Image (cartoon, rainbow, N blue to C red):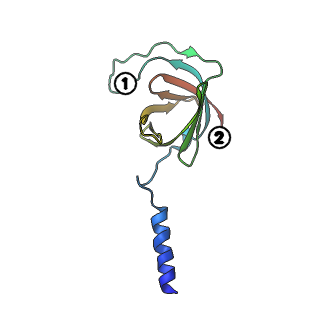
């Protein structure tokens, strides 16, 4: 009986471990967000002289749903896609299954509650739900 119990404990330990260690998620980013404005410019936090263009309003913008389990669902005009994500020091890291499109984006949430993602194009998002 002891052997069975130790085998169960060992297997449970193996199954509870993830490959990459602990996934970190900023709780402030969790929820459903919709793009309301964008700038077609790449944000460079290391360049103090990087000046972004003008924010352009977006009607019926893409929706990003950041889940607490580390999954994100993107709903865009081109379709729906999913990825895993984690956050670290105001950067969100996306991990897609095919590994071809893994990327990261700097983010911040302003005092009015808008989420800014600075990536291929910078977007401003409003929160739709938690």
Check residue 57 in the rendering and tell me which mark sits there, or answer none: none
Q: Name the residue located 46 percent from the left edge and 50 percent from the top edge.
A: 23
- Badge 2 density bin: few <14, some 14–19, many ≥20, Cα 10 Å: some
Q: Nearer the viewer, residue 94 or 117?
A: 94
Q: Position of residue 126 (x, y in %)?
A: 61, 28
Q: Nearer the viewer, residue 80 or 91?
A: 80
Helix or strand or loop: what does disc 1 sit on?
Answer: loop
Q: Name the residue located 33 percent from the left edge and 21 percent from the top edge.
A: 48
Question: Image height check: is 44 above or below 26?
Answer: above
Query: What residue is shown with label 1?
Result: 44
Q: Name the residue located 47 percent from the left edge and 42 percent from the top edge.
A: 97
Q: Name the residue located 55 percent from the left edge and 24 percent from the top edge.
A: 124
Indicate left or right for 68 with 89 as reference.
Answer: right
Helix or strand or loop: what does disc 2 sit on?
Answer: loop
Dividing the image into 4 quarters, which one contains the C terminus? Answer: top right
Q: Position of residue 3 (x, y in %)?
A: 47, 84
Query: What residue is shown with label 2?
Result: 130
Indicate left or right for 117 with 76 as reference.
Answer: left
Q: Nearer the viewer, residue 104 or 27?
A: 104
Q: Position of residue 73 (x, y in %)?
A: 58, 38
Q: Nearer the viewer, residue 62 or 56?
A: 62
Question: Image height check: is 22 above or below 101?
Answer: below
Q: Quadrant of residue 32?
A: top right
What is the spatial separation of the Cα atoms under label 1 and label 2, in whole angstroms?
Answer: 29 Å
């Amino acid at each position: 009986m002891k052997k069975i119990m130790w085998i169960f404990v060992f297997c449970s330990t193996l199954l509870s471990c993830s490959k990459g260690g602990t996934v970190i998620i900023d709780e402030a980013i969790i929820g459903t967000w919709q793009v309301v404005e964008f700038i077609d410019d790449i944000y460079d936090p290391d360049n103090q002289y990087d000046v972004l263009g003008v924010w352009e309003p977006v009607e019926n913008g893409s929706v990003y749903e950041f889940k607490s389990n580390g999954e994100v669902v993107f709903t865009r005009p081109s379709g729906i896609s999913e990825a895993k994500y984690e956050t670290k020091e105001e950067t969100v890291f996306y991990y897609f299954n095919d590994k071809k499109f893994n990327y990261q984006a700097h983010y911040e949430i302003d005092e009015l509650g808008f989420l800014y993602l600075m990536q291929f194009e910078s977007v401003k998002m409003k929160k739709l739900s938690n």
